[in-house]
Amino acid sequence: MHIFSHPLAESVKKARSRMDLTQEQVAALAETNTRTISSIENEKSNTRMNILFPLVRALRIDPREFYYPEMGMESSVKHQLRVLIDNCSDEEAAILLSTTEAMLNAMRKKDAYAATVKNESLTPL
């Protein structure tokens, strides 16, 4: 079919599985029919934007998955974190940002300190 058919099919199948949805449920979310979803997943569809846009949004697919499959996929943990953040209010996101920055700084300082101590213990006197 087309160069994008396989990455799109894989992205849709993976997202549908991750969300534990049937093709019928995905079709309802994307306001299309089951045959369209099946065609996409079986790489037999030249998907139009009026189908692709609501499908990608309903399944929360990162478009880079099928536009740039060579970039590799982010871990499922990062994906889950991104979905949580996407569902936050601006106020919640601001709190998460400052909390996360503080936590990362503390973790990185601890790692740097541990590396320094390890290196000093390996250095001959």
Image: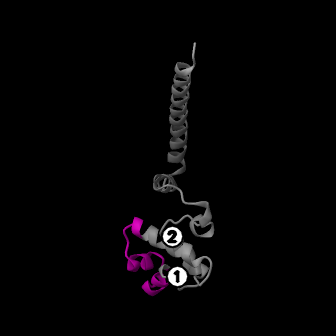
Q: Amino acid at mark 2?
A: Ser
> What number is the disc on residue 104?
none
Alpha carbons under labels 1 and 2: distance apart: 11 Å
Choose top left, top right, bottom left or bottom right for residue 115.
top right
> What number is the disc on residue 11?
2
Q: Amino acid at mark 1?
A: Glu
Mark earlier in primary sequence (1, 2) = 2
Label 1: which secondary element: loop
Label 2: which secondary element: helix
Residue at the image position 52 percent from the left and 24 percent from the top: 118
First to last magenta residue range: 17-40
Residue at the image position 48 percent from the left and 82 percent from the top: 42
Which corner quadrant holds the C terminus?
A: top right
Q: Residue furthest front?
A: 124
Return the x and y of residue 21 as percentages of the image width and height.
38, 72
How crowded is the residue under tag 1: few (<14 C-alpha within 10 Å), some, or many (20+)?
A: many
> What number is the disc on residue 43?
1
Which corner quadrant holds the N terminus?
A: bottom right
Residue 37 among those drawn in magenta: yes
In the rendered image, the vertical position of residue 66 relative to residue 118, given as above or below: below
Count the marks: how many?
2
Residue 96 among those drawn in magenta: no
What secondary structure is the magenta-colored segment mainly?
A: helix
In the rendered image, the vertical position of residue 32 relative to residue 85, given as above or below: below
Return the x and y of residue 98 as percentages of the image width and height.
54, 38
Return the x and y of residue 2 as percentages of the image width and height.
61, 82
In the rendered image, the vertical position of residue 32 relative to residue 120, given as above or below: below
Q: Between residues 61 and 125, which one lies in front from this camera angle? A: 125
In the rendered image, the vertical position of residue 35 relative to residue 100, given as above or below: below
Residue at the image position 45 percent from the left and 83 percent from the top: 38
